[in-house]
Amino acid sequence: MFSVLHPRLWFLFFFCAVCLPMAISQKDSIYFSSHSEAEEIFRGVQFEVAFVLHNSGEGSGLQPPSFKGFKVVSGPNRAMKSSILGGKLTHEQEWRFTLESQQPGVFTIGPAYIKVGDEILESNSVKVIVKNEKMQVEAALGDSLNLEEAIMLKLEVDRSDVYIGERVTLDYVIYSATNIQSFKTVKDPEFVFFRVQESEEYDHENKKVVRNGRSYIKKILKRMSLYPLKEGCLTADSLKMEFEIEIKKESESSGNNKAGASLFSKRPSVRVQMISDSVRVCVKGLARGKALPVDCKSMQMQVGNIAQANKEGLGVFVMVNTEGDVKRLLPPGLGISGPRMKVRLVQEGEYFQDGKIIGERTFEYRLDQGDKVKLTPSMEYFDTQAGEVKTLSLPTREVKVLSSLKPVSPKRGKKEQQEKEVSSALVFVVDVSSSMLTQDLKPDRLNFTKKLLRAYVKNQIRHKAGLVLFAGESKVLCPLTRDHSLFGSIIDSLEVGSIKDGTGQGMGIVTALNMLREVSCSDKSIVLLTDGVNNTGYLHPLLAAYMAAQLQVSLFTVSIGRPGEALTPVGKRSDGSYIMGKAKSEVNDELLRKMSEATGGKYLRVEREEQLDLVLWTLNNLRSRPGSRPGKLTFHPAQLDLLLKGTITGEYP
């Protein structure tokens, strides 16, 4: 009988007998659930949470929970599947999130919500226990090692007892007895009373060493040259780093995957942060309190072309080498007083020789009038091995200096004299690092700063104003002027990318001090406008603040923007344009406040556009109280002049 049924009747019979009951049964079993692949997990490990809509054709408008206590790495990733199990047709829609545990504790991932037709369905909650990563590391390492033995983070110096200006080598070192997948620096040390320079001259290869009776792999991450600028016991702050350590299979296989193994991703790892000990260096002063260079090794002199003397004066070049701080090298004397002489720094550098870093400076002397003169280049320096002052000199050499046109001193007109008799001078030091494009202020931080500057100088005709920009380096954009219309037009040229990126606040301040020290007026101030944390430059910003205090210049610091996440540059395209993305920003409020207080200035914070009027009112009523507090760093006049003029402009009076 069935063999003669028409094919269409066969299909109708199958649908009525099998599929229709399934369809009716599934109508009564629509529900929304959630589950996590981890019940117990360690801090820093990633895992997945899935939200599943069962037996419904379509769901829309997913509202996931807040995931408080976890970082969302990715998601939602959507998938759909249908299957027949036990004679039953099932249909599922799934939304998956990859999370990362942030801190230890017991957390509840709340319900999610989905719309099906006119109805809103709610999923169940999920509980996840997050354990301390130290427990995980030690579980991964086994019984033979604990965390402190597995990884040691050290700051190591080659000497801890030195003289001012003597070089101290400091290495960032990792000693590892386990496999480290990756690492990153969370916080670099701060070197307030040192001049700091990074060095590439060291062995970058990993070495096997034995420490405390255990074998380790030693890796030098970075080498710094520290040159102390102050007597006493100075401290280099701690180094903070984050390490990612892979979990071993033994720990994965125990406890129903409670060590954090992922079913959906690569074998898990754990992140742990470590802090090194600080470093202490005892610094002795030099003989007779002089701001001398140390450990000078050689000197050379070269006399320029006499035929050029009629135009530019006779050029004499003197090159000096030192094992100490090259920035302390002042121009040697030539042993003459008759001819008028100009001196400038023409070259500075360092090179590696016989395992030592040698600093080198070349000075050019221009003798522009006179006849025959005898030149005897000489300079005093401090020999750290002998502990005494010595003299480095060259044999006397007689040279002929042809007569040249005598320089005529220009007569000062009324306008120039009025310019010099300014009651107050103010230099704005503006951050133009890439983070100034952050859009928490409209349209961004830099354009808000421009608006502030324009509004301030609009009616300040009694002030002489100047403008310095800084990022990874510093530059004078507008010399001191009372022409505020000119100043306003120059403000428009402030832009990100005009100089090397970075945040060198100390360099910006010192550039401004070079401008102000040439001005004769009763009130000198610097206003630093920045949005970041100092991360480059040879001079720490607090050290620059102490220099400002000694020069009777008040420093007012203004932080632009608010901490937290905002749209900011996170990368750069090949055409030079910035890739914008959400990222956290922070400001070192404590440091900026200390810098202002050291000079009798004030610290301001601008987080909203509505604060513009308040900031303008404060700047209009600046009352400087220059002078550092007792016990802070002061500089020998020659050393101060060296740090200010010799290292920035290369010109000497």
Image (tube, rainbow, N blue to C red):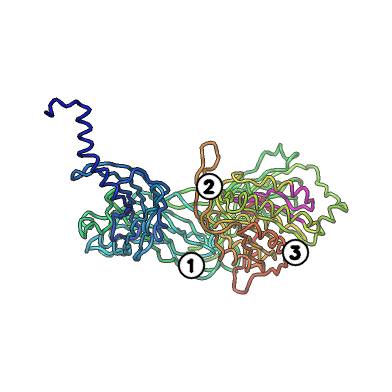
The earlier-in-sequence mark between 1 and 2 is 1
The earlier-in-sequence mark between 1 and 3 is 1
**Mark 1: amino acid:** Thr
Residue at image mark 2: 569
Residue 276 point in image, percent of width and height: 40, 63
Looking at this view, name the residue that lies furthest to the bottom.
Answer: 630
**Mark 2: amino acid:** Pro
In what element is the residue under mark 3?
strand
Span of residues in magenta: 464-488
Residue 77 point in image, percent of width and height: 37, 45
Q: Nearer the viewer, residue 47 or 81?
A: 81
Q: Is residue 94 magenta?
A: no
Predominant SS along the magenta part: strand
Residue 598 point in image, percent of width and height: 63, 68
Q: Nearer the viewer, residue 37 or 604?
A: 37
- Check residue 486 in the rendering and tell me which mark sits there, or answer none: none
Residue at image mark 1: 235
**Nearer the viewer's eye, disc 1 or disc 3?**
3
In this rendering, does residue 299 appear at all? Answer: no
Compute the Cα span from label 1 to label 3. Answer: 35 Å
Badge 2 density bin: few <14, some 14–19, many ≥20, Cα 10 Å: some
Q: Quadrant of residue 261?
A: bottom left
Q: Nearer the viewer, residue 144 or 560?
A: 560
**Mark 3: amino acid:** Asp
Compute the Cα span from label 1 to label 2. Answer: 34 Å
Residue at image mark 3: 523
| Residue at image point 66% right, 53% down | 449
